[in-house]
Image: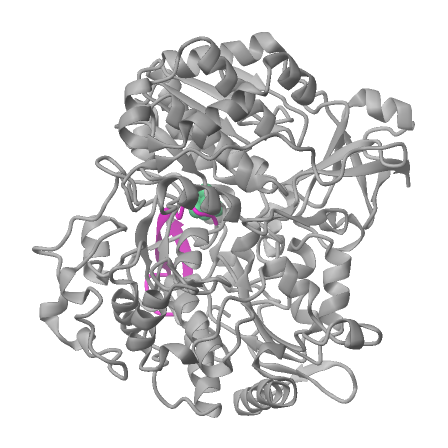
Amino acid sequence: ETGETRRTRTTDTHCPYCALQCGMGLRPEPAEPGGLLVVERSAFPVNKGALCGKGRTAPSVLSSRVRLVRPLIRRASGRLEPASWEEALDRVAEGLAATRSAWGADAVGVFGGGGLTNEKAYTLGKFARLVLGTSQIDYNGRFCMSSAAAAGTKAFGVDRGLPFPLDDIPRTGCVILVGSNLAETMPPALRYFTELRANGGRLIVIDPRRTRTAEQADLHLTPRPGTDLALALGMLHLVVAEGRTDEAYIAARTTGWPQARAAAMAHWPELVERITGVPLPQLRAAVRMFCEAEHAMVLTARGPEQQAKGTDTVSAWINLCLATGRPGRPLSGYGCLTGQGNGQGGREHGQKADQLPGYRMLADAAAREHVARVWGVEPDSLPGPGRSAYELLDALGADGDRAAQRPDAVRALLLMASNPVVSAPRAAHVEERMRALDFLVVCDVVLSESARLADVVLPVTQWAEETGTMTNLEGRVILRQQAVEPPEGCRSDLWVMRELAARMGWEKGFPTDPEEVFEELRRASAGGKADYSGITYRRILAEDGVFWPCPDPSLAPGTVSGAGTPGEMNDDPSNDHSAAGHPGTPRMFLDRFATPDGRARFLPVSHRPAAEEPDEEYPLLLTTGRVLAQYQSGAQTRLVDSLNEAAPGPFVQLHPRLAEKLGAAEGEPVAVVSRRGRAVAPARLSRDIRQDTVFMPFHWPGEGRANTLTNPALDPTSRMPEFKVCAVRLERA
Ligand code: SF4
C-alpha cells in the first residue's frame, strides 16, 4: 500500500537516489487521491527530463510488499515482532538512557546517512549532541567524498563538490575525469560530456577499467589501482618541464608553489610510468590536451578519493589545476562528483563527527558559541569531535575480551538511513561488531541487512512521502516535495527524533515540520562557510534551486536571537528574502578563495604505495564500484524487479588471460580472497580490465559481498577507508 496520493495532479519533486538529484514529476494514476504514482519528465535544468532506470522505478519501492509499516521489537523469542509506536519509542528511549547512565554519553553512538534531507541531518546532529550528549556521531558520507572535502578545504578554504554548475562542462575545453563511471552511476550527467565533445572539447578519463564512461573519452589512461597520486604528480612534472605553468596566476592567487613544485619534480615521468603502468606518450598527450585548452577542469570521484592517501591524491590533482591557472576562472577549475543524494548537504549541517551546521568546525570556539546560541544551550555543554565512521563502527560492542580492550566502546547505536553491513569496509567485522552491541536501533523503510540485527526497528517515511531539502553535487539546494501520504504505520525521522527527545527530557527544540527545521538551519548556518541563511523554500521553488553560499546579513552571527524560537520566522511572510536577497553563488572563487588571505594553497604531496600491495600470497588487486541498475547497498533498488533483472547479483570482472590461468570460464563461480575474508561470485570475463586487477560491485550481501574483502586502512586526514584497492588472490569456487 502506498497510502493515498496527496494531490490529484503532478507534484514536482526529485529522485531519491544519487547526487544529481534529477527533477521529476509524480502524477497519481488514476488522477485522484489513492492513485499509484507515475513518473513524469520534468524541465528541471540539471537533468532536463532525463532519468535513469533507478529514478524511473523509484515509486515502486514506496509500495513494495516488504515495506516496513509497523515498528518491530526483538522479543524474548529472539525474533523481531510487531509493536506499537508507544512501546517501541519507550523501549528506545529507555535503552539509550540506560546505556548513557551506566557507561556515559559516549557509550551511545549515532550513525547517519548521506541520503537524509538537510533537515534530518541537521536534526540528527542536534539530537546526538543535545539529547544524547554524545560526541560519537558520524555518517556514511565519510565513505563517499570525505577525501575530496578535506583536500578542497585545505586548498580553497571550503569544499563544495562542484564550485561551478554542470552547465559549464559543455563549454570548457578539456575535462580530466578521474575515477568516475558516471555513465552508470548518474547516466543523465553523461549528456554534459557528450556535449563537451560535440563542441570540440576533449575528455580524458582515468580509470583502471574501460567503463561505459571511458568509452566516451578522447584519451583513456588505465593506471594501476592506487596510483592516481603518482599519475597527477607525473603530469605536474611534465607541465613544469614543458614550461606550461601559469606563473602570473600562481603569483597572484596562490601560496605554497615552491614546495609543491619541488615535490612534483621528484617524480620523474619514467618513474611515474613504472608506478602507474601508464605509457609515457599517453601521459604527455594528456598534459598537452589539458594545457592547450583555454579552459579546463579536473573532476574526481571515488576512484582517487577512496584510498588511504585519498586526501593527498586529490591535493595532487588540485595542484595540477592551480599550476595551470584553472580554479576561480570561468569554465575552469577543480570539482568533485559527489555520490550520495545528499552527500554534500549531509555533511554541512552537523552529522559529521567534527562539524556543526554551516560547515562550522566543532573544535572552533566561535562556531560552538554561534550554534549553541541558536540551540539555546551553553557552548561548553556541546561535546567535542568524535570518531570517524569506520572507527565508530570498529568501536561497537564490549563483548568478551573487548570489554577490557575497549573501555571506551560504543554500546548502543542509533542507525538512520544506512546499511553498513553491506556498505562498510571489512564488512564481516563490522557486522560482528554490530551484533555485539548491547542495544541497536534502526530507522529504515525496509528490513535491510543492518536492520535485521536491531533490537528495535522504526519504520520511517521516504522521499515522496515527505518534504525536505537536498543539496546536489553542484551545491544547489533543491526541494523534494511530498506527493503521497505515507503508509499508516510509518512516521518521519523528524517525528521519531521529536518523540525520543521528549521522552529524554527535551520537550522543545525538535520541530517535525521540515520548513520549520529549515528556518532554524538557516539561522544556524548563517555566517558559516556553507551559509544557507538567504535560502527559503519559496526561493528554491521559484529559482529551480539556490546555490550556497547564500547569506542573509540579517541572520549573521550576533544578530541571531536566543533559542527556543525555532519556527518563529516561519510564520512571518517578511522573512521571505527572495525579492532583495543574495542571488546565491553558482560559481565560487572568482574573486578570492575562502582562505584567510584569499589565496589558494598548494599542498606538497608525494606518492606512496597502497596500504596493501600485492605479494606472493595475494598477488592481485581488487577494486570495487557500482553498476547501472543498483544503488549503494542495494537495500532499495534490490526490491525493484526490472532493476534486479538487469543486475541480479554480484560478479567478478577479470581479464580472460587471468581467467585462463585460473582455469575459470565465463559464469563459473570464483572466490576472491583477501586478508579479511572471502567472497564468491560468477566470473565475468572482459578485456576491459587490467590483467593485474579484478573488479566487484558492492551492492549485495551474502557470499558475494564485496566489502567482506575491502581494506579499512584509513586516510590520516579524511579518515576515508581504502575501498578502492586491496590485495587479493583468486580461487576456483
Ligand atoms: Fe538521476 Fe541519479 Fe536518480 Fe538516476 S539515480 S534518476 S541519475 S538522481
Q: Is residue 23 magenta?
A: yes
Where residue 353 appears, as percent x and y from the top left, is 51, 63
Asked whether 548 or 716 is in front, the reply is: 716
Residue 204: give x, y in percent of width and height.
49, 20
Does 483 appear above or below 280?
Answer: below
Q: Quadrant of residue 322?
A: top left
What residue is rendered at 54% in x and 61% in y? 139
From where the camera sits, is residue 514 visible?
Answer: no
Image-quadrant location for residue 109: bottom right
Corner quadrant of residue 435: bottom right
Please provide the residue range marked out in magenta. Answer: 18-39
User: Does the magenta run of residues contain 638?
Assistant: no
Q: Report the residue at 83% width, 20% height from top.
A: 657
Tell me, what colour scheme is on the image? one colour
Q: Is residue 146 above or below residue 78?
A: above
* Picture quarter with the C terminus: top right
Above/below status of 274 relative to 51: above
Within the displayed image, which quadrant is ligand 1 positioned in?
top left
x%, y% of residue 536? Answer: 21, 61
Viewed as shown, does residue 601 lie left or right of 128? left
Q: Position of residue 684 (x, y in %)?
A: 76, 31
| Callout count | 0
The residue drawn where x is 50% and y is 66% is 385
Residue 572 in sight: yes
